[in-house]
Image: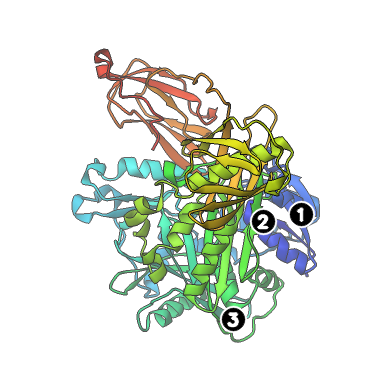
Amino acid sequence: MIGSVLVANRGEIACRVFRTCRELGLATVAVHSDADAGAAHVRHADAAVRLPGVAPRDTYLRGDLLVRAALAAGADAVHPGYGFLSESAEFARAVRDAGLVWVGPPPEAIAAMASKTRAKRLMAAAGVPLLAPLDPAAVTAADLPVMVKAAAGGGGRGMRVVRDAAELGAGLGAVLESARAEAEAAFGDGEVFAEPYVDGARHVEVQLLADTHGTVWTLGTRDCSAQRRHQKVIEEAPAPGLPAGCEEELLSAAAGAARAIGYVGAGTAEFLLAADGRPYFLEMNTRLQVEHPVTECVYGIDLVAWQLRVAEDAALPPEPPAPSGHAVEARLYAEDPARGFAPSVGVVRRLEVPGEGGIRLDAGYEAGDVVGAHYDALVAKVVAWAPTRAEAVRRLARALERARIHGPVTNRDLLLRTLRHPEFAAGPVDTGFYGRRLGELVGGPSDGAGLAVVAAAVAQAARGSGAGAVAGAWRNVPSQAQVKRYRQEPDGTLHEVRYRWGRSGPVVEDRPGVRVLEAGGERVLLEAAGVRYGVDVTTYEEKGDEGAVYVDTPHAGAYAFTPLPRLPRPETRTEPGSLLAPVPGTVVRVAEGVAAGKPVAEGQTLLWLEAMKMEHRVVAPAAGTLTALHAETGRQVAAGELLAVVVARDEAEGDVRSEGSGAS
């Protein structure tokens, strides 16, 4: 019997496993890098062991340190979570060799499926339909589009789609190099392969659970087609709108794959469903999936609890429970979709999601925690269950809308717009959904920003005056106009609110039709066009900083503003052509031949930054000369730090076109 579990992971999944361990009466042990010393998963554990360093390769990818930590803390078992070493047969063997219980499949099963290339050969022998593999060195324009994919791991790392013959060059050399580097950084394995890319396809998977006594459960299907950069964003169970007979074919193929390798524990078989309804095996993930909560909601089970029971040699019942209803999960990332999904970092000031009405929150951060640049950008997962898909989608959208998310920029607005987009609401969508619709779902003016900034101004005025929440409590002061200025985050839009004091409170001068009915430091009641709106305003005043004001409205969205001084400060200027780091991260590569004094072409990649396990290219925004290069491999940089300077060729004519970050 297991008494204590070490989770060889961090963030949301570590917190998730610890929750079940507590419910089962098990003691818990966390591990943490130096960057994670104060993280939520460390606080949620009974004991914690430091992994010296920050980079994954020095900490969470060091199997020897993880085993040593388990032994030092007196743990009986190791749960790998997902990502990092969760699909490493070598790590599973090391855990077992140390006399510890491995909460996962046998190392032999992991080895059989850990490499997507080996897994495909095994499935081909078992008669499972597959996409024909391609020789990367022999790919021609006739083979396009082509997918380059990491053989290990997942999460969209090490994946590239090649559509343009101009990218081929000598085979797929440059694309392969980039994919290998990203895969090596994320998984410690740089093997990649190529296969045809199927446009208009869906990503459908089957949840598996197997015990050591020969019982294999197939717990229905999930649809994970709403992806950006091959990273899942919204998942649901069951997969909607499958062709007749397709579900049975998928479940049978998944169960056959599990039995073929003697699988034990929780795992997932992933398939590509072509537009004509034909399924193709993609891979088998020999671990728990990020999206496992939607299956748990539909089947009313705890997959982590069953992982632990199976590890103790418990037998599954002959048949799984019957499914009920529909569940949808949205991944809340610290990233800015309007800036190419650039990672966002900073302090999580508040993270609250309404829990009523079938809503579940699996979070890896709490108020006061810091989202850094070293690891995955996932902050939390919000899950909704309902009897029907339409109700589940509606519940999830409303929960996200009512959530209080103060801190780093997130993809919350993108999630909301996705859930309420007619194409997604009608369902199902294919993997090209964001490619077609991203322009509609990201950016654009915010209709509610005008009211939100009024609420921010009058709330701050109320705080400064010491007035209560009732309009009649305002002091009678001179009625000359007052001005408050704000910068909207993260897009930088500037707002100005002019108001004067009346006998019953502030009167807004530059917003016709807007009345302030009540105002307090944290709650404002406005009327616009005859409709009343209750708005929550939260102000964070920080020493040495401009502070921040967050405005949460019931129907018009959430907004973040930075108060500005009454008189604008002189703008900090940078040299024309300065290329600034778009995100905090590490310089992982400088392009060959790039050096100060050398000519560069417009769009030429100068260097690569790694942040949150993803690579970001820094490119020359104009043809010209690289006059300065301040980046070198291995250097850590802050957002906005100067990396290089490019002087455009036509600068002499006064047309310097090289301003901007140059990041893509």
Residue beneath disc 3:
214
Which one is in front, 321 or 435? 435
Residue beneath disc 1:
45
* Residue 328: % across, % down: 52, 68
Say what secondary structure mark 2 lies in: helix
Q: Is residue 86 visible?
A: no
Q: Is the residue 250 above or below the residue 595 in the image?
A: below
Q: Residues within 10 Å of mark 2 (few under 14, many from 20)?
A: many
Label 2 with label 1: CB-CB less than 8 Å? yes
Q: Amino acid at mark 1?
A: Ala
Q: Is residue 574 visible?
A: yes
So how many labels did they put on this image? 3
* Residue 352: % across, % down: 65, 55
**Residue pictured at 21% horizontal, 46% vertical:** 165
Is 31 positioned to the left or the right of 140 in the image?
right
Mark whose residue sits in front, 3 or 1: 1
* Residue 613: % across, % down: 51, 44
Query: Cα distance, mark 3 to mark 1?
Result: 34 Å
Q: Of callouts 2 and 3, which one flags the residue occurring earlier in the amino acid sequence?
A: 2
* Residue 123: % across, % down: 41, 70
Q: Of callouts 3 and 1, which one flags the residue occurring earlier in the amino acid sequence?
A: 1
Q: Is the residue 480 above or below the residue 46 in the image?
A: above
Query: Cα distance, mark 2 to mark 1?
Result: 9 Å
Is 203 positioned to the left or the right of 651 in the image?
right
Pick out the residue farthest to the bottom. 318
